[in-house]
Image (cartoon, rainbow, N blue to C red):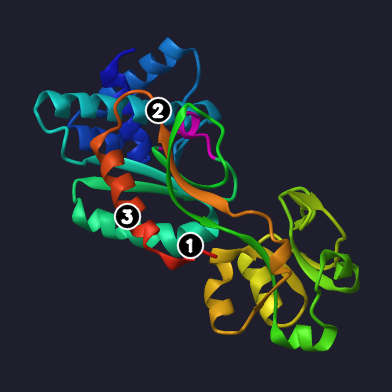
């Protein structure tokens, strides 16, 4: 594969057009056009849809752009290593995390990291699904889960619990459930998966430490955004089952009350994950070390 054509393709995607990419690369527009045409010919696939007004990536182009960035970043790292500069973080750092955790905890530390490392830029995706790091072109993921994939390096930074909360007003009106068997008498706020219903609630029992489905409350409200569900719980619309970090401040302030605590499932690890394989780039090592140190100090990740 011709590396110069890959650089041209990435520049066109970044600039949003052939003319702008040509200016950025100090090339003529016809030379940029020829490079893209040759690359598409090599691949046997159309990467860009062109019109007189706009240019956009095709589906194949979107996928190939992730691979192109990875190749160019790896080349940049190799060149930096040869120059003896591998220890300095530089280049684009791609990070993904769940939406709410990303907003509350990853975004602030990432901005601080960027201010300390001016040669690093960042691309961020906060989304509530598992992002495949290599396939989707990401360097680091924050995962709230137990991981079984040995092809990834996982750095544990804390843990959270899945717990049930309600407002004091709701509990004064409807009573506080002492066991999952009492849940059918209660209303609840459920968090729906895209294209599906809310997950069933699971609890442990004194004689059975494994989380299992038990009696369920009536789902009075289904939402697809955690913030909306927490607001509904604060307003007294029912019980909500959330992760501890999401409501820590509300519980501490007494705006929400933690119920069914003896029946909560075991804590879930919070981990920074990056692909195993070649030696991690300086930007990845530096960010993981920085983020791990910050997150391990955060009380929201040490719920008891």
Question: Could you classify mark 3 by the number of other residues whose Cα lies within 10 Å: few (under 14), some (14-19), or many (20 or more)?
Answer: few
Q: For residue 133: magenta?
A: yes
Please name which of the two marks, 1 or 2, marks the residue nearer to the observer.
1
Q: Is residue 32 above or below residue 38?
A: below
Q: What is the CA distance from the residue labelled 3 to the residue labelled 2?
A: 21 Å
Q: Secondary structure at mark 1?
A: loop
Q: What is the CA distance from the residue labelled 3 to the residue labelled 1?
A: 14 Å
Q: Residue 299: where, in percent of width, then height? A: 44, 67
Residue 155 visible in the snapshot: yes
Q: Which residue is mark 1?
A: 302
Q: Secondary structure at mark 2?
A: loop
Q: Secondary structure at mark 3?
A: helix
The answer to whether mark 3 and mark 1 are in CB contact below 8 A is no
Q: Which residue is mark 2?
A: 276
Q: Residue at x 34, y 31 (%)?
A: 10
Q: Which residues are magenta?
A: 131-138
Q: Residue furthest front?
A: 207
For the residue pair 7 and 126, the one nearer the viewer reads as 126
Question: Could you classify mark 2 by the number of other residues whose Cα lies within 10 Å: few (under 14), some (14-19), or many (20 or more)?
Answer: few
Q: Which residue is mark 3?
A: 293
Q: For residue 63: magenta?
A: no
Residue 48 visible in the snapshot: no
Q: Is residue 7 above or below residue 119?
A: above
Q: Residue at x 16, y 36 (%)?
A: 87
Q: Residue at x 28, y 60 (%)?
A: 112
Q: Is residue 152 above or below residue 194?
A: above
């Amino acid at each position: 594969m011709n590396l110069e054509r890959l650089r041209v393709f990435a520049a066109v995607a970044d600039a949003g057009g052939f003319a702008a990419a040509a200016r950025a690369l100090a090339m003529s527009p016809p030379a940029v056009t020829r490079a893209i045409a040759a690359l598409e010919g090599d691949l046997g696939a159309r990467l860009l849809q062109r019109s007189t007004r706009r240019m956009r990536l095709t589906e194949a182009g979107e996928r190939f752009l992730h691979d192109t960035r990875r190749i160019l970043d790896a080349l940049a790292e190799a060149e930096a290593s040869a120059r003896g500069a591998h220890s300095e973080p530089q280049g684009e750092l791609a990070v993904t995390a769940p939406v709410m955790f990303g907003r509350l905890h990853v975004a602030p530390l990432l901005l601080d990291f960027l201010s300390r490392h001016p040669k690093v830029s960042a691309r961020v995706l906060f989304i509530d699904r598992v992002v495949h790091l290599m396939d989707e072109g990401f360097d680091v993921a924050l995962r709230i889960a137990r991981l079984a994939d040995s092809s990834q390096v996982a750095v544990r930074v804390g843990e959270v619990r899945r717990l049930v909360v309600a407002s004091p007003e709701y509990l004064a009106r409807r009573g506080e459930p002492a066991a999952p068997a009492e849940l059918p008498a209660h209303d609840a706020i459920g968090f729906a998966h895209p294209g599906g219903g809310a997950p069933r609630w699971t609890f442990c029992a004194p004689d059975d430490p494994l989380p299992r489905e038990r009696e369920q409350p009536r789902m009075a409200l289904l939402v697809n955004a955690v913030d909306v569900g927490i607001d509904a719980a604060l307003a007294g619309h029912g019980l909500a089952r959330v992760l501890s970090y999401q409501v820590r401040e509300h519980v501490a302030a007494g705006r929400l009350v933690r119920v069914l605590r003896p029946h909560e499932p075991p804590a879930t690890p919070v981990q920074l994950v990056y692909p195993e394989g070649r030696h991690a780039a300086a930007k990845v090592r530096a960010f993981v070390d920085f983020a791990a140190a910050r997150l391990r100090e955060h009380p929201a990740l040490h719920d008891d």
